[in-house]
Image (tube, grey):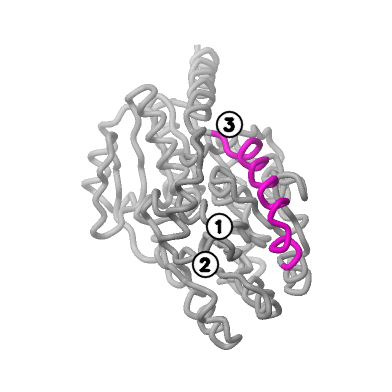
Amino acid sequence: MIGIFNDCYPPVIDGVSVTVQNYARWLNRKCGDVCVVTPAVPGAKHDEDFPVYDYFSVPIPMRKPYRMGMPYVDLDFRSRISRVGFSIVHAHSPFSSGRLALRLARQQKVPLVATFHSKYRADFERVVPSKTIVDYLVKNIVDFYNQADEVWVPQAGVAETLREYGYRGRVEVVDNGNDMATADDITPLRNEGRAMLGVSAHEPMLLFVGQHIYEKNPHLIIRALSRLRDRRWHMFFIGTGYAAEELKQLAKSKGLDGRITFMGQVADRLLLKRCYAAADLFVFPSLYDNAPLVVREAAAMETPALLAAGSTAAGVVADGMNGFTCRADEHALAERLAALMGDKALLTAAGSNARKTIARPWSEIADEVYDRYLHLIRRLKTSVA
């Protein structure tokens, strides 16, 4: 059994939970022996072709909808998971699910793969006032990755963040796939999306998809657009987060509440594809994200991204070729948005190149991942023998 472990899973939606869901779905299609292990969400029902083992959890203050898993107090879960024989375990989080994966790997003498996804220090610094405590928490994360048999990152630049935290071991780059990647013509999706959202064919449409948190700089987008009131455009925000209501109030205070639409969380993947396809430009000036899946999803729908220059997220983009970059401040963002909205040909060319260079289908990734798993399993057996 291949075990995929993470501290969130749909219906909690973020880039890592969607990645984990696709890992499990595509590996299950390939070998038919996969499960997911994750904290439970009250009322959630998992209609998957593979088992989802969830365990007791409580809400995390100021981080709705995320939950803190407590697997060791869940006796029913402990009974169920103890009967699962793993051949390899893969942790996508260093917290409750990752620690559980590590314990099971050592008990059953199977390999542990650990993928590093997020800038955890930034998360800690937002809610923990003590640098000493933040340093301690980061040290625990590094200790976790030091115990893995192999550490993966989804993008080369992400390794730099892990190195900054103090990790000195070997890192393998294993790209994330994209369940929206397709060879089909996306024109029908674009037309359907525009009609659905009420955007005319000649009106520039801008899109942000992600958690509504200040670390991702969505407020910069609103402030930049307030400088472009004399231009024609419509901006859509998709997602939820602690800053959602404040962002709505900011848009209203800038007189943009009729030109900025907050759609909330969109769980329907086809609906989300239509939104990506309908957009002319994906605006994502985050300095927080490492390898955001949303950039790849937009690319699959031939929508280029405007990213923060120097950010880890921008590592997949060559400015002006398959996407765009600018400084993460409202003045630079406003200037670049104005220039790009006035150059439809450049946006179209960049979108086409983004689809070719950034969006890889999960079928390819699953083949690569499965081969790596088999190699690790054989390597551990050889070392034990």
For the point 55% across and 44% down, the residue is: 144
Q: Is residue 126 magenta?
A: no
Packing grade of label 2 (10 A; few <14, some 14-19, many >=20) is: many
Local secondary structure at mark 1 = loop
Up the image or down, 54 lies above or below 232; here it is above
User: Which circle marks residue 279 in the picture?
Assistant: 1
Mark 2, mark 1: which one is toward the viewer? Answer: 1
Going 56% across and 49% down the picture, which residue do you hit? Answer: 298
The residue where tag 2 is placed is 236
Mark 2–mark 3 distance (CA, rounded to whole Å): 39 Å
For label 3, the residue is 150
What is the quadrant of the N terminus in the image?
A: top left
Vertical side of 369 occupied by 212: above or below: below
Residue nearest the viewer, comparing 115 with 246: 246
Q: Is residue 355 magenta?
A: yes
| CA separation in Å, label 1 and label 3 | 38 Å
Q: What type is the residue that disc 3 sits on?
A: Glu
The amino acid at mark 2 is: Phe
User: Which element type, helix, strand or loop, lies under badge 2?
Assistant: strand
- Residue type, numbered disc 1: Ala
Task: Decide if residue 171 is in sight here.
Answer: yes
Query: Which sits in the foreground, 23 or 126?
Result: 23
Q: Image point 42% across, 53% down: which residue? A: 192
Give the residues in magenta: 338-360
